[in-house]
Image: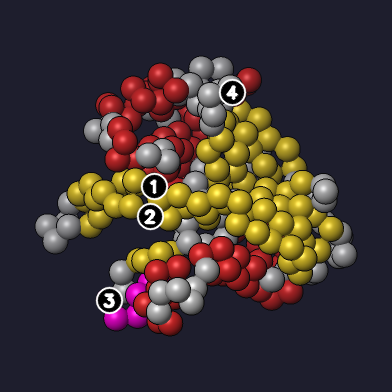
Amino acid sequence: MMASLHMVELRPQAPALFRFLRDQGLDMGRADEDMSYGIHAWLAAAFGDMAPKPWRLLMDRRRPMRVLGYSAATADRLRQRLVEFAEPGAFTVVSDPEADIASKPMPRWSPGRRLAFEILVCPVGRKADSGLEKDLFLIQVDAVGDGRVDRGTVYCSWVQERLERDGACEVNTIRLKGFRLVNQVRRAQSTGGSRKIGRLVRPQALLHGELTVGDPETFGYLVAQGVGRHRSFGYGMLLLRPPA
């Protein structure tokens, strides 16, 4: 039986967040275009091993920055961790912990329940020859040749296979709604033992669809774990809604 799961909503204040990142030497500007490393660094500093994972940053010109994530910890436990152990710079990113940290328990979905879903993923895999990460679409192009591969088909098949693994659910429909290449920052281990900043470009894909829940326990683990790589960096969170 898996532990109870909570959806957490965090409302970081952008000026305080950027100040925290500058103080940490992580003000990368356009190099961290999706804010994945910056949010990851703040979550780790604020909540340690309680930090939500997977999570997703929601931000547009009309609404303030929000981070949604899944965690075994409730809002009360996250507030306690923040107050007791976070450094002041990380603490002040949420100006009012009572208002800016919220949570709700996730339900146990019954078999046969139909749900709409949305998921933002970083669709990359390891190249067989070098072990380096590469866009899954480009890996397929290398294998079968350009002109015979559709990007949406590659990404949808990859996500569908992971959603349906071990009978968690059946995907009824799935489509690629958005795609772009984003600049990202990661810290890489150097030969001297220090961690240096690396800059790279990775694919980002937004997929929508509908699914039918299979085994509730397995589906619960799927929701809690997320899909694909870089789940600590804002990818792989399965957002669920009523079907259309």
Marks 3 and 2, how far apart at CA: 17 Å
Range covered by the magenta-colored residues = 125-130
Mark number for residue 63?
4
Mark 3 burial class by Cα count in 10 Å: few <14, some 14-19, many 20+ = few
Secondary structure under tag 4 reads loop
Marks 4 and 1, how far apart at CA: 22 Å
Q: Is residue 191 above or below residue 23?
A: below
Q: Residue at x 36, y 25 (%)?
A: 18
Q: Earlier in the sequence, mark 3 or mark 1?
A: 3
Residue 102: percent from left, percent from top: 66, 30
Q: Earlier in the sequence, mark 3 or mark 4?
A: 4
Q: Amino acid at mark 3?
A: Ser
Residue 126: say if magenta: yes
Q: Residue at x 54, y 31 (%)?
A: 59
Mark number for residue 130?
3
Q: Amino acid at mark 2?
A: Arg
Secondary structure under tag 3 reads loop
Residue 4: say if magenta: no
Mark 2 burial class by Cα count in 10 Å: few <14, some 14-19, many 20+ = some
Mark number for residue 202?
2
| Quarter assignment of residue 68 | top right
Marks 3 and 1, how far apart at CA: 23 Å
Marks 3 and 4, how far apart at CA: 42 Å
